[in-house]
Amino acid sequence: MEHESGATVSNLWTGMPSDDEAHDVRVDVPRNRDAEFTAFVRDSGAYLHRTAYLLCGDPHRAEELVQSTFERVYRTWAKVRPGTQRAYARRILVNLKIDSWRHGRRESFPGDDKIPVTPASDHAGRIVLRDELVRGLAQLSTTQRRVVVLRHLLDLPEAEVARELGLAVGTVKAANSRGLARLRDLLRAGAEAIEPVTFDERAVLDQSRAALRRRRAAQAVGAACVALLLTLGVLTRGPVPLPGVGPVVLPGGELIARLFDDGRTDGFGPAPAGNTPVDCPEEVPAPTPTHTAGPSEDVGPLIDPAVVDAADARPLTCYDVDIEAITSGSLNDAGLLVTEYGDPLPEPRGLSRTGTISYFSSAELYDDNDETADARIWTDNWAGGSGASSLTWYQGSRAFPTGLAVTGSRVVWSEYAAAGTSPRSSFLRTLSSHSDGGTTTMVDPLVTTQERMWLLATTRDHALWTAGVTYDDTRLFATTLDGDGTPTELAPGVTALAADDDEAVAAVLTPGAGGVSTTAILLFDYLTGADLTGTLLLEFDHNTSAEVTAIAVSDDVIAWTVMPVGAGSGTAALYVFDRVGDSDSVVQLADGVVEDLRASGGLVSWTSTDTGAENPANSSYLYRATPSASGFDGPDLARFPGGSVTASVAGARTAWLENADARQWLVKGAVIPTLERD
């Protein structure tokens, strides 16, 4: 008799049976964890390395990814069902790689000139095929590359690919079809399998054991630190005065305050109940209703988009975001929003994916006649640290801020000289924010011009802005952020501008006759070359009483709003073009103004002000515009909590400012990339 583990057992029975009596005796043989694991490493190491290499394109990074996968598998080996170990490890490997994609840019895939190849007899043809495959995969979008590798190179069915990547089956089919079509144009022939590497299973076991010991030690240290902080919180609850620094609340005090306080702060403004909590239902909420566009609905240049009504937005839930910090604020005697300790309360529109928020001190009070001697730009670290940089001093007065743009760790802002200066100039300046709250500022302005600056955007390497005498008569310019470039004129008539890490988009308006105008969406992804005319992505006609007022761009989507000219003069809509799949959509908006339109992956956020109401109020939205972001076949729309809020999203971060008369709360959180729908 052979046991399911492979052990053979014979002549085992109990009692005194007869010679012709049949017996079925089951003997449980304990699984040898280390022996099974080393056998798994030996049998599956080459397979996992091949998968990792095709996903990341670098043999050394592939080995690191496989080692990390082995460590995760070893940690939970006792829970893995026999026969599913390889699929379990593959899922962990893909998830680890997806995490790296979410925090970084697209991979740079090397060719065989960068990969050490063991000499062999006449294998040049196979190297050419392999090199073409790797280079072809490098030119696919992230989603297409994942689907093609798992679907064809690992031979997984579409349903399993969808489960492993958290996508809808329809999205997998579309990405697979488009990815293969793209590869057919790039490859001259099929590709040979990647030459596998041999893993030392004993070394892998030793490293996995060491990783498990480090993890348990870290957990023990973390538990001890929490206990210490709670103890300090009990002993030092409330602000502790430090010489030369001022009152400081220790981490333990913050923990105790959040656990036991009721939201009131003695001596700090009124005492409301607190910020509006995020809803946390028992199950993942159903998606926002969508419908197919009717004959009377304007879908612009989009093809068969799903249509969503903003009035149907569901409440934001704990399935959308994990709240990490809440900072309360109030209006001081000067009418400025400040924190409990008198610092300016950050505004979400300066949020970056690095975990900082850049904002101006008291910018909402500035106008052309203000003197701004103490004006500063602040950077607030996610953990609470902050830094500040002064604005430009010009002819005896500080300039005042007019615009702010953030991409990655780069912050760019525009300033306008105080009234009475001559010539009255505008300035463009930049700084780099750091995760510890510090900043590095370029002292001299990047650009000084006698025209007023209006729209502003920044990539990692370039700043873009519109300038002109009036908002309706401007031209688009760009310059490098190193201070060595000369501003270059790109286009006239820009009504909306946005940028991501390495590309910018602009909406260019061409007035027409007969009540019809034309807007072109131009892409600028190479701002240092000789051809700066941009690439035409989309072009559409619309009524002259409307224009594109906001635009946003990410690797996955391009979103823009078409708004009526003049408040309350008609309906507005948000259009989302899916750059990866075929899931375009339109969000029908109520009368009002859309501000701070932001895109990050398949997520879009914006703030809408209902100017037609007697008491205008803001509503902010988080829009999962693609199936990969919603976990559903279509989009999903959620409204941020609170009565009047402004919100923003960048990378895996979100922040919103909730307004309740004289009190406000800044809420910071992490966006859950994809809703885990069944």
Image (cartoon, rainbow, N blue to C red):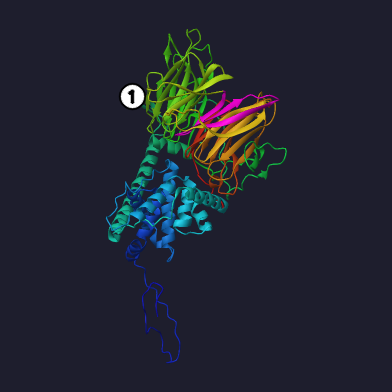
Dominant secondary structure (helix, strand or loop) of the stretch shown in magenta: strand
Above/below status of 461 relative to 65: above
Q: Position of residue 502 (x, y in %)?
A: 45, 34
Q: Is residue 518 magenta?
A: yes
Q: Residue furthest right?
A: 296
Q: Residue furthest bottom?
A: 19
Q: Is residue 618 visible?
A: no
What amino acid type should be assigned to the residue bearing mark 1?
Pro
Residue closest to the eye, 364 or 273: 364
Residue nearer the viewer, 84 or 488:
488
Which residue occupies the foreground of this view, 365 or 307?
Answer: 307
Q: Residue at x 40, y 50 (%)?
A: 132
Residue 521, above or below 293? above
Percent across and percent down for residue 511 are 63, 24
Secondary structure found at label 1? loop
Crowding near the residue tagged with mark 1, few <14, some 14–19, many ≥20 C-alpha atoms within 10 Å: few
Task: Report the residue marked by disc 1.
Answer: 243
* Quadrant location, the N terminus: bottom left
Rendering coords of residue 351 (x, y %): 48, 32
Q: Is residue 260 magenta?
A: no
Q: Nearer the viewer, residue 570 or 81?
A: 570
Range covered by the magenta-colored residues: 493-522
- Residue 402 in sight: yes
Rendering coords of residue 627 (x, y %): 56, 47
